[in-house]
């Protein structure tokens, strides 16, 4: 049943992605509603899938690459809905749903069987560390989408060629503010994830920091977001620069997430 | 019964002609009632706005109606009857209906897509309803025109884009800033176009208005007019640190804001977005500053470019709107033609009933002493006969055919149904 649930969620996300991409070219209230409905159904099924895995496995289902990618997507959709509810930004889905779909698709191609938990993972840190990390990363994913929207809208305003998309995208300041809020939301979570990770490493291997590739990349990511926030406070780096940096930040996250998985070295091999 | 339109608009008549024919204030009610009293006019509506004066009516003969309407207009407005002959457009039937749909949908407006005309048309209709000058045809026509206009509004994007420079400036400001009511606005210099744009921006609710001018008295004057604060010309650069939107139009022959000045300002305001509109010719603001981050500089040509692009968009949308109107026109005509056959069918049926009743009465009077059963049988046969006889023509009338008018006329003649159709 788990497989069917996952595949169903994937299908709904796929449909939502198609609708949200068509929205870029021709927007209407009906397609926007259909998109939200499809994504909501997908999200509900996805939630059931995660709960089902949790019950079947008897522990937090974030213990292999399939589960991790799936949970990451789930967090992104969750924050997407929160944003949508709060700001009602048209076209946000066109920039977010494709990311969700690609993540889910790659998750679907990874092995799914539930294996017995390795002793290292058998810890209360598992839930705390992973949930913090993925919620933080999901906020950064949304910041990526919003940053992208900012760059598109900024291009229209600067080049003075105002098209149909210009009409439908939110104002620059709105996008900039949301981008900033997402990062201030994600950054503390991400910081806590690193700290809890260190504590966990200490309890599992006896040392806080081992310089395995995942740790190194996470540190790089952490610095990028720290720079974004710092530069904003001190030098007023907002708008285009903040948008660009938040996009670069998320790309490093993706590299850390998928690149290292391919290398299969270091302590995070199970993920 | 035919829809009939007499009128003039901004395209064929200058304002001095339009105002002579306008029905303003109490004259509108008086005019409407007098127009309705014309013998040829069965229903009446008058639409009078600054861009058009139009009289709508339900008439039988457009030729007679146009003559009597012209006479009415010349008498009502004390104009020379002859001067009206070439000053007006006159439409009847399908052309009249199409014209009214186009007017309602703002395709006939000076600024195509502007929304006021629909409201004005609704008001004209409301007035006619309260004065009871309309009936079945114009009521239906007006309701249809309003729904056509709404369909055009929702199915095309005819009213979406800004088509004036000051409107385009406000639209742009809204796409840069989240909330104009928290933004500080500064008017630098003066000039008709700058003041118009400023008025538009202030009208959309900015937080604070600053006015700076080379002559301080002029700044004070404008500031009090705009409910703002005057700023000495030497201080305006300093004020730019807290100003989000600037409209600039001074007569200076050189740049009054240079790139390095702007860079300093941006640093001091921590890179918060600035929208600058340079309306002056020659330009007063170094165009290079558009290259700075978070600075958005538009000059008059840029804004005009936006407006032109929007105009072009509207033109394309207008073509879609024309198609919608043709579709709706067809459904309206169908409704109208069915209207003609209905009273004929009723008259035909009444005629048959009348003959049947007459003949039965005669028969029952002649042969006395027959039982109820026999009476019923005879009545039954008479009903069956008449029904069978009037069935084919009734069916033909109900059918959709091309020359229905001819059919209706033929049936009326063949069955001897004369006189007025009972419409009401």
Image: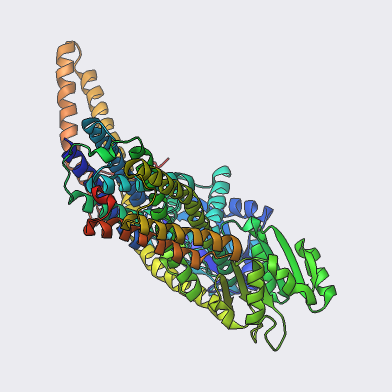
**In the picture shown, does residue B55 fall above or below A124?**
below
Of B366 and B180, which appears nearest the observer? B180
B343 left or right of B96 in image? left
- Find residue B266 and report its horizontal and vertical position in percent: 63, 71
B256 left or right of B424 in image? right
**In the picture shown, does residue B244 fall above or below A56?**
below
Write down the quadrant of residue B371 in the picture.
top left
- Find residue B10 and report its horizontal and vertical position in percent: 56, 71
Q: Quadrant of the C terminus of chain B?
A: top left
Does residue B107 appear in this view?
no
Residue at left offset 33%, top offset 63%: A25
- Find residue B15 and report its horizontal and vertical position in percent: 63, 72
Q: Which color mode does the image show?
A: rainbow
Of B326 and A98, which appears nearest the observer? A98
Farthest right residue in view: B217
A170 left or right of B336 in image? right
**In the picture shown, does residue B194 fall above or below B378?**
below
Of B318 and B333, which appears nearest the observer? B318
B318 left or right of A256 in image? right
Of B2 and B385, which appears nearest the observer? B2
Write down the quadrant of residue A98 in the picture.
bottom left
Farthest bottom residue in view: B253
Label count reads 0
Does residue A202 appear in this view?
yes
Farthest front residue in view: A206
**In the picture shown, does residue B134 fall above or below A61?**
below
């Amino acid at each position: 049943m788990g497989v069917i649930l996952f595949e169903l969620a994937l299908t709904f996300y796929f449909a939502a992605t198609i609708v949200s991409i068509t929205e870029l070219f021709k927007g209407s209230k009906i397609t926007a509603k259909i998109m939200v409905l499809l994504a909501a159904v997908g999200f509900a099924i996805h939630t059931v899938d995660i709960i089902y895995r949790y019950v079947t496995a008897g522990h937090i289902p974030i213990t292999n690459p399939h589960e991790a990618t799936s949970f990451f997507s789930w967090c992104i959709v969750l924050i997407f809905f929160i944003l949508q509810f709060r700001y009602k930004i048209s076209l946000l889905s066109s920039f977010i749903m494709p990311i969700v779909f690609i993540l889910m698709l790659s998750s679907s191609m990874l092995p799914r069987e539930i294996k017995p938990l390795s002793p290292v993972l058998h810890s209360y840190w598992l839930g705390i560390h992973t949930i913090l990390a993925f919620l933080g990363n999901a906020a950064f994913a949304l910041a990526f989408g919003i940053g992208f929207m900012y760059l598109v809208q900024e291009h229209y305003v600067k080049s003075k060629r105002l098209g149909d998309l210009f009409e439908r995208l939110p104002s620059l300041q709105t996008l900039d503010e949301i981008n900033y809020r997402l990062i201030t939301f994600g950054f503390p979570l991400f910081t806590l994830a690193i700290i809890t990770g260190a504590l966990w490493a200490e309890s599992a291997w006896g040392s806080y920091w081992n310089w395995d590739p995942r740790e190194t990349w996470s540190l790089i990511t952490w610095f990028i977001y720290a720079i974004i926030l710092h530069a904003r406070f001190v030098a007023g780096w907002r708008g285009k620069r903040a948008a660009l940096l938040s996009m670069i930040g998320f790309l490093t996250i993706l590299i850390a997430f998928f690149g290292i998985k391919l290398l299969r070295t270091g302590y995070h091999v199970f993920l | 019964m035919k829809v009939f339109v007499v009128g003039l608009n901004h395209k064929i008549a200058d304002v001095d002609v339009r105002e002579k024919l306008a029905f303003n204030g109490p004259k509108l009610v008086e005019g409407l009632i007098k127009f309705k009293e014309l013998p040829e006019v069965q229903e009446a509506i008058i639409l009078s706005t600054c861009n058009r004066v139009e009289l709508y009516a339900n008439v039988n003969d457009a030729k007679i109606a146009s003559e009597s309407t012209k006479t009415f207009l010349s008498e009502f407005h004390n104009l020379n009857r002859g001067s009206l002959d070439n000053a007006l457009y006159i439409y009847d039937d399908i052309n009249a209906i199409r014209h009214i749909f186009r007017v309602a949908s703002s395709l006939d407006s000076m600024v195509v897509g502007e929304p006021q005309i629909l409201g004005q048309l609704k008001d004209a209709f409301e007035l006619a309803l309260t004065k009871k000058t309309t009936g079945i045809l114009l009521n239906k026509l007006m309701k249809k025109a309003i729904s056509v206009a709404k369909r055009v509004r929702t199915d095309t994007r005819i009213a979406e884009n800004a088509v004036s420079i000051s409107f385009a400036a406000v639209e742009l400001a809204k796409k840069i800033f989240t909330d104009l009511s928290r933004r500080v606005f500064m008017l630098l210099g003066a000039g008709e176009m700058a003041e118009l744009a400023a008025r538009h921006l202030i009208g959309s609710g900015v937080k604070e208005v600053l006015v700076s001018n080379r002559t301080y008295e002029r700044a004070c004057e404008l500031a009090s007019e705009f409910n703002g604060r005057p700023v000495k010309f030497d201080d305006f650069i300093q004020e730019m640190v807290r100003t989000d939107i600037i409209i600039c139009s001074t007569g200076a022959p050189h740049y009054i804001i240079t790139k390095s000045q702007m860079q300093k300002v941006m640093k001091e305001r921590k890179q918060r977005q600035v929208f600058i509109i340079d309306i002056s010719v020659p330009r007063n603001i170094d165009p290079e500053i558009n290259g700075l981050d978070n600075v958005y500089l538009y000059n008059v040509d840029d804004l005009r470019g936006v407006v032109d692009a929007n105009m072009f968009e509207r033109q394309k949308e207008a073509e879609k709107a024309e198609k919608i109107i043709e579709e709706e026109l067809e459904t309206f005509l169908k409704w109208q033609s069915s209207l003609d056959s209905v009273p004929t069918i009723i008259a035909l049926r009444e005629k048959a009933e009348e003959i049947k009743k007459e003949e039965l009465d005669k028969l029952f009077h002649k042969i006395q002493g027959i039982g109820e059963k026999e009476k019923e049988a005879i009545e039954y046969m008479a009903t069956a006969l008449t029904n069978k006889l009037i069935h084919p023509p009734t069916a033909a009338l109900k059918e959709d055919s091309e020359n229905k008018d001819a059919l209706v006329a033929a049936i009326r003649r063949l069955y001897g149904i004369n006189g007025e159709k009972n419409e009401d």
